[in-house]
Amino acid sequence: MIKNNQPKFKQTETPLRQDYEGQVGQIPEDWEVMRLADSGVELIDGDRGNNYPNGSDFSKNDFCLFLNTKNVTGEKFDFSDCSFIAEEKDRQLRKGKLSRGDIVLTTRGTVGNIAFYDDSIKFENIRINSGMLIFRNVGDKFVTSYLYQILKSPYIREQFKEFSSGSAQPQLPVNSLKHIRLIMPSIEEQRKIAGVLGALDEKIELNRKMNKTLEQIGQAIFKEWFADKDNANNWNMGLLGNIARQRKERLLSNEDNAVVLSAVNSGKLVRSDDFFDKRVYSKSIKNYKIVKQFDFAYNPSRINIGSIGMLEEDIVGAVSPVYEVVSPKRNYHYFLLMFLRLNNTKEIIKQFSSGSVRQALSINSFLNIPVNIPPEDLIVKFNKFYSVLLEVIQENQTQIDILSQIRDSLLPRLMSGKLRVR
């Protein structure tokens, strides 16, 4: 049971406690505050010696996963883009090998991302790179699952910022990390706090995995219906320009009711203010290009495999004037969306992109990508099926958003003792 708590506070405080409470407010009298250096948590650096792997040592599948910055995102691992090293290279490295229960922290560039190497991770051999650290709980003062939760808390994230150095590429030195201040309730209360927050994390992750599975089902059905050569043999070979056109309309003034959008690597067209920490677009959006529901947009000078996004919301959007906007023929939006995700299409985009230093995909090149055009009745049938999948995905995403808000509101209150688990 969780209940609101008006904690009792000590009248005589240690300097460390006073310093901590000066930043986050008072905490219960039966909780301690200690430096990370005194917590029984080891800080383990990655190997930076002569045997540190280089480009030729990496492969897409081998003995040991060698983490890169894309693998540690916010609060968890992301294994969508992995690099591996051979067993022989792994044996040459001295430090930085993960054990179950370890917590990984990014300490260079994007500082403060956290991931927990628990039993759910399928890889048995993992090493960190030189921009990461391992937290290994070898003492008896902390429950590891609680330590993971507190390292995600706003209190600790603020301290990561406090102890970081460098403006161009922030770094979090090991010696500075040792001075991070941790809140230590009793072991029993740590388990309860971690249990509540962990249950929310598990439900959020379950919904994410379900959505990923549903997306994979949609892609599999698309390939079966539209990418199978036996089916496509009876269709007309055409160009994307036969099922899509360039949209050239622009906003007339800043007062037009339009949402600024950006295409991101996931292949989505998202609200810029939601995705970026700061505004990355001009204060004036006059002359921005208009994007409507089911339109696609991309930046031709920054084209990559996943950065052609479709607007799913029924809103009027706007993208930077440098973008190209493509409006699909009626009913062909989901077909175009799935077609752009095919590996064959990605290879064609690479071939059609020009430039040796920075690849660019002109609107003419985009509209001249070859495609087998299926009959509209099959397109309509697929739309009905895929729309149902999207409804379930959206319901799951709504749950994720709500649960994330609950977790984010609970976390600081549980970590401060203002809300206690009984």
Image: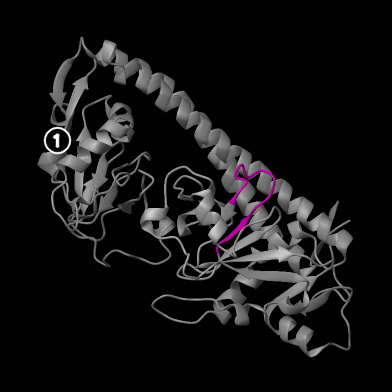
Q: Which residues are magenta?
A: 113-125
The amino acid marked with disc number 1 is: Leu
Task: Name the residue located 15 percent from the left edge and 41 percent from the top edge.
Answer: 352
Q: Nearer the viewer, residue 84 or 210?
A: 84
- Name the one closer to the observer, 278 or 54: 54
Q: What is the residue that sits farthest to the left in this orientation?
A: 364
Classify mark 1: residues with Cα within 10 Å, few (<14), some (14-19) or many (20+). some
Q: Is residue 264 above or below residue 384?
A: below
367 over 280 or under it: above or below: above
Residue under the point 12% across and 34% down:
368
Q: Position of residue 220 (x, y in %)?
A: 42, 23
Q: Is residue 158 visible?
A: yes
Give residue 216's position: percent from left, percent from top: 46, 29
Helix, strand or loop status at disc 1: helix
From the top left corner, tell me how far across and down residue 138 is, in percent.
Answer: 78, 65
Residue at (49% x, 82% y) in the render: 165
* Nearer to me, 49 or 24: 49
- Give the residue pinned by disc 1: 367
6 versus 17 height, above or below: above
